Amino acid sequence: EFPDTVELVRYLAILLAQQGNQEKCEATIKDALIRIEQPIAHRQLGMLLARFYTQWNQKDNAYTLLDALSQKLPDDIPVKRRLLLCEQVIKDPEKAQQLVDDIKSLEGEDGWQWQYEQARVWFAADDFEARYPQIVTHLQGNLLANPSDQASRMLLAASYERAGELQLAISTYREGLSRSPDDLNIIIPVVAALYKAREYDEAEQLLNRASAAKLYHPQLQQFQLQSHLRHGQLSLASDILQDLL
């Protein structure tokens, strides 16, 4: 028998995925989607299956599932936001803009989710420079309403950096890092920006702190490699190269 609650389905699906049984994992979630009718359950299970499809490098299946789920649940903002992350949507500006407009109509003019997604769509667009002032306005508005909005803060910093305002970007990255000092998704772009600005001492302090906290990421290793080479520490650089290869 198949489980009848989202929690049990999730548990069983994750267990099957960990065991490498993709076919049974997929069948378990699909069967539950047929039997369990609540919209929230459909969203949770659909997003779970989409996550597995992405892990299994079945991106077309993930997109097809999320697109169908968005049509089945037209008022569900999280599904639309997840759909916006699909490569098929990223490559289709009209589709992406329609999803943002849909979110805006659901949230209202002052909604933070559509403003973030609008800024993200414009950030990736060919006309970034023309949209840059509006991107900044949307993201600064989000941060004014919610200073803890790290997603908007990091996108704002990346926008500053792309626009060539490196010191403003670094200042914004630093604010994000002060709020989440162990978040690799923040540490990496901060260090990259500091290296770009030739602020090596601060970058190396962050690398040393990350190392002391046992935070690992290949990109951090590459930064450490650059640091050792810059100081002529060839033996330490060689050790990192062996780890990276």
Image (cartoon, helix red, strand yellow):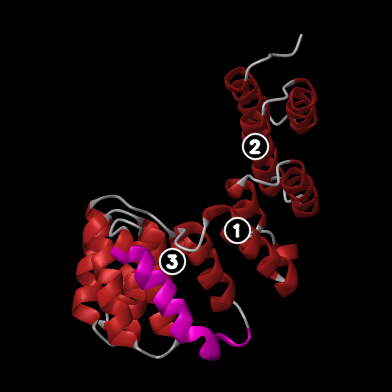
Helix, strand or loop under label 3: helix
What stretch of residues is rendered in magenta?
126-144
| Mark 2 vs mark 3: in front | 2
Indicate which label's residue lies in the foreground, 2 or 1: 1
Residue 192: image x %, image y %?
Answer: 37, 76
Residue farthest along the top direction in this orientation: 1
For residue 223, side relative to residue 34 (left or right): left
Labels 3 and 1: the sequence-earlier one: 1
Crowd rating for badge 3 (residues with CA inside 10 Å; few <14, some 14–19, many 20+): some
Is the N terminus in the top left, top right, bottom left or bottom right quadrant? top right
Residue 219: numbered disc: 3
Q: Is residue 141 magenta?
A: yes
Q: Tell me the residue at 64%/40% (across/down).
A: 47
- Considering only vertical position in the picture, is 6 above or below 181? above
Q: Give x and y (percent) for residue 189.
A: 38, 71
| Residue that label 1 marks | 105
- Is 122 contained in the magenta span? no
Number of dots carrying numbers: 3
Amino acid type, mark 2: Arg
Q: Position of residue 60 (x, y in %)?
A: 80, 54
Q: Front-most of 213 and 115? A: 115
Foreground mark, 3 or 1? 1
Label 1 is placed on what type of residue?
Answer: Ser
Q: Which disc is residue 152 wearing?
A: none
